[in-house]
C-alpha cells in the first residue's frame, strides 16, 4: 500500500466524509533534483573541510601556503562558487501547482481507521484474510489504553405482520 492509495482505501472502507477543494502543492521531487541536492551538500562539506585546512595552515605551526597554492585556491574557490550556484539552481523546488484535494478532519480519520480495523478483524474471523494472530496489535492497543472491543448494535425486532407500504403489490412481497 502506498500513500497515494490511502485516500481511496479510506473512502472505500472507512466511510469517511471529505470536502473536495483545490490547493497549491509542490510537485514531487525528481531524481535530478535529489541528485543535485546531494551533490550540493557534498560540495559544501568539501569546501568546509578545505577552509578548515587553510585556517590551520594560516594560524598553525605548519608552513604558510605558497603563492602558487594561494592562486590555485582562488581558482578553486571560483569554480566551487559556480558549482554551488549550479547545484542550487538545479535542486530548487518546482513552482506550486493546483491539485484537487480531499480534506477531512482528524476525528473522522481516526473513526475511519477504527472501522477499517474492525473490518479486517471480521474478515479474519470469516477466514477471508489469512492473519489469525492479532496479539501484536492487541498489545499495542493495550499500551495505548484503548483495547480492541467489538461493539454490538442490537437490531430492532422484526414485526412479523405490519404495514410496509400502501401499495398492495409491495405489501404482498413483504409478507
Image (cartoon, grey):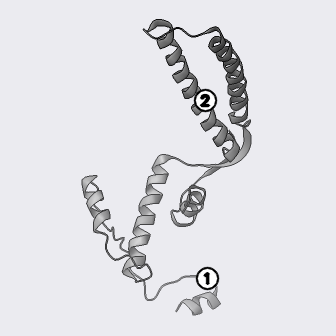
- Neighbour tally class for label 1: few under 14, some 14-19, many 20 plus, Cα within 10 Å: few
Q: Which mark is residue 166?
A: 1
Question: Which x, y percent locates residue 48?
Answer: 54, 22
Residue 26, above or below 86? below
Exactly how many numbered labels are in the figure? 2
Residue under the point 53% across and 8% down: 64
* Residue 7 visible, this orientation: yes
Residue in front for this viewpoint, 81 or 136: 81
Residue 48 shown left or right of residue 77 in the figure: left
- In the picture of the structure, the residue carrying the numbered disc 2 is 43
* Residue 22 visible, this orientation: no
**Which quarter of the figure has residue 38?**
top right
Circle 2: element type? helix
Give the Cα distance between marks 2 and 1: 82 Å
Q: Are marks 2 and 1 in contact (CB under 8 Å)?
A: no
Residue in front for this viewpoint, 80 or 143: 80
Residue under the point 31% across and 70% down: 134
Residue 57 shown left or right of residue 43 in the figure: left
Q: Nearer the viewer, mark 2 or mark 1?
A: 2
Question: Which x, y percent locates residue 86?
Answer: 73, 29
Q: Where, quadrant-wise, is the N terminus in this rendering?
A: bottom right
Question: Which x, y percent locates residue 21?
Answer: 68, 46
Residue 136, above or below 56? below
Q: Earlier in the sequence, mark 2 or mark 1?
A: 2
**Which quarter of the figure has residue 94?**
top right
Q: Which mark is residue 127?
A: none
- Neighbour tally class for label 2: few under 14, some 14-19, many 20 plus, Cα within 10 Å: some
Question: Which x, y percent locates residue 159?
Answer: 43, 84
Residue under the point 74% across and 42% down: 98
Residue in front for this viewpoint, 147 or 168: 147
Circle 1: element type? loop
Residue 163, above or below 47? below
Amino acid at each position: 500500500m502506498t500513500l497515494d492509495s490511502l485516500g481511496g482505501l479510506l473512502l472505500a472502507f472507512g466511510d469517511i466524509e471529505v470536502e473536495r477543494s483545490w490547493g497549491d502543492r509542490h510537485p514531487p521531487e525528481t531524481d535530478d533534483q535529489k541528485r543535485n541536492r546531494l551533490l550540493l551538500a557534498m560540495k559544501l562539506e568539501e569546501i568546509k573541510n578545505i577552509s578548515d585546512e587553510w585556517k590551520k595552515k594560516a594560524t598553525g605551526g605548519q608552513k604558510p601556503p605558497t603563492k602558487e597554492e594561494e592562486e590555485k585556491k582562488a581558482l578553486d574557490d571560483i569554480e566551487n562558487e559556480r558549482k554551488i550556484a549550479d547545484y542550487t539552481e538545479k535542486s530548487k523546488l518546482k513552482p506550486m501547482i493546483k491539485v484537487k484535494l480531499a480534506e477531512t478532519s482528524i476525528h473522522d480519520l481516526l473513526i475511519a481507521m477504527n472501522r477499517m480495523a474492525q473490518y479486517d478483524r471480521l474478515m479474519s474471523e470469516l477466514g477471508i484474510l489469512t492473519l489469525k494472530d492479532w496479539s501484536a496489535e492487541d498489545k499495542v492497543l493495550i499500551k495505548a489504553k484503548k483495547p480492541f472491543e467489538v461493539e454490538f448494535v442490537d437490531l430492532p425486532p422484526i414485526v412479523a405482520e405490519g404495514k410496509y407500504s400502501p401499495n398492495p403489490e409491495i405489501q404482498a412481497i413483504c409478507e
